[in-house]
Amino acid sequence: MKTSELETRLQGLSSDRGFEVYWHVRLAATGEELTRGGDAVLPSASVRKISIMMAALHAAAEGRLDLDQPVTIEKELQEGILSGVCQYMTPGLTFPMRDAILQMIITSDNICTYEVMKGFEIPEFTDYCRRIGMDRTTHRTRLPPVGLATGHSLDAVTTTTARDQVLLLQLILAGAKGDPAAIERLGVDATMCATALRFLTWQRFRSMIPGHLPTMTTVANKNGWGERGWMDAGIVFKGETPLYIMSVTTDEVPKTMPDGMPGRVAATGLIAELSRACWDALS
């Protein structure tokens, strides 16, 4: 399938879904990029945690964060948490910061996210994004706010663009392969890039970008959801070869679709369809 045909297919899938759809796709073999509102600033939800991970690894590379330092799960942090596993663990559980970063990625654990971020001012994470070229990504919270209205303002949450997320994943992939420009830009070495990539491939939530792909396809991704929609960003491999990098965000997703299905099902299913269209065209 030609690139133009793939773009037509993706645009067609995204039309008239009952909610807004934004995406950016990079074809790994050629570097060509396709987009649908890829520069639109939208809620990032837990996709923000990819850049938090890289900022934390950058701090570790500079000696400002010890990946072996103990993190202890305190009871007061377990109340009101909506994602992850540490909210269910016995208070006092202790593990290294490295494992907190891991849980932040693979189970989207918000207690661990707080622990990773708490030693830094929130603007430092935005500054890191600016350093690497994610010019439209802004971090605003350590823990995601609860009780927001469906139509909440962007200023209430961390925001990003699909293009920014594809850029970040492309840099991680290039850095893991030893590309000096990517390594310098990210401020971490190739080993840390490879660690970040490995963490993303251990993702436990696989209903979106990996959802319609062959079983056990390697996907390095981080997804999320918020009051306005569902989103995912990831690198899809065939064997050990990267095929495409994509970031998709759905917005203004209704709680219930006209056919009675939850909006969640429609949004996550569409993201899986978009990814499968790329797979069929490129694999």
Image: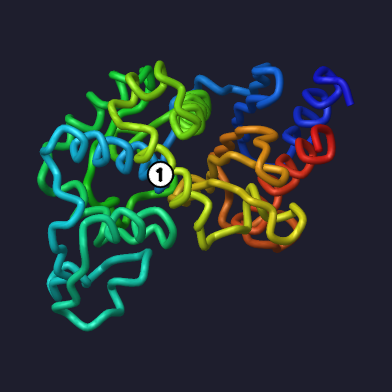
Answer left or right for 113 relative to 108: left
Residue at 21% from the left image edge and 57% from the top image edge: 97
**Res 22 quadrant in image:** top right
| Residue 64, position as x, y percentages in the image | 11, 38
For label 1, the crowd category at 10 Å Cα-Cα, with few meaning under 14, some 14 to 19 and many 20 or more, is: many
| Element marked by disc 1 | helix
**Res 34 quadrant in image:** top right
- Coloration of the structure image: rainbow
Q: Nearer the viewer, residue 95 or 76?
A: 95
Q: Nearer the viewer, residue 204 or 22?
A: 204
| Residue 246, position as x, y percentages in the image | 61, 34
Q: Nearer the viewer, residue 74 or 132?
A: 132
| Residue 98, position as x, y percentages in the image | 27, 55
Answer left or right for 37 relative to 41: right
| Residue 45, position as x, y percentages in the image | 40, 45
Give, as a three-letter code, the residue at label 1.
Answer: Ala
Q: Which residue is labeled 1 in the image?
A: 196
Residue at 30% from the left image edge and 29% from the top image edge: 138
Q: Nearer the viewer, residue 92 or 232?
A: 92
Q: How many marks?
A: 1
Answer left or right for 105 relative to 220: left
Answer left or right for 251 relative to 18: left
**Quarter of the image that includes the C terminus:** top right
Residue at 51% from the left image edge and 20% from the top image edge: 39
Residue at 63% from the left image edge and 51% from the top image edge: 218
Q: Residue furthest bottom?
A: 90
**Quarter of the image that includes the N terminus:** top right
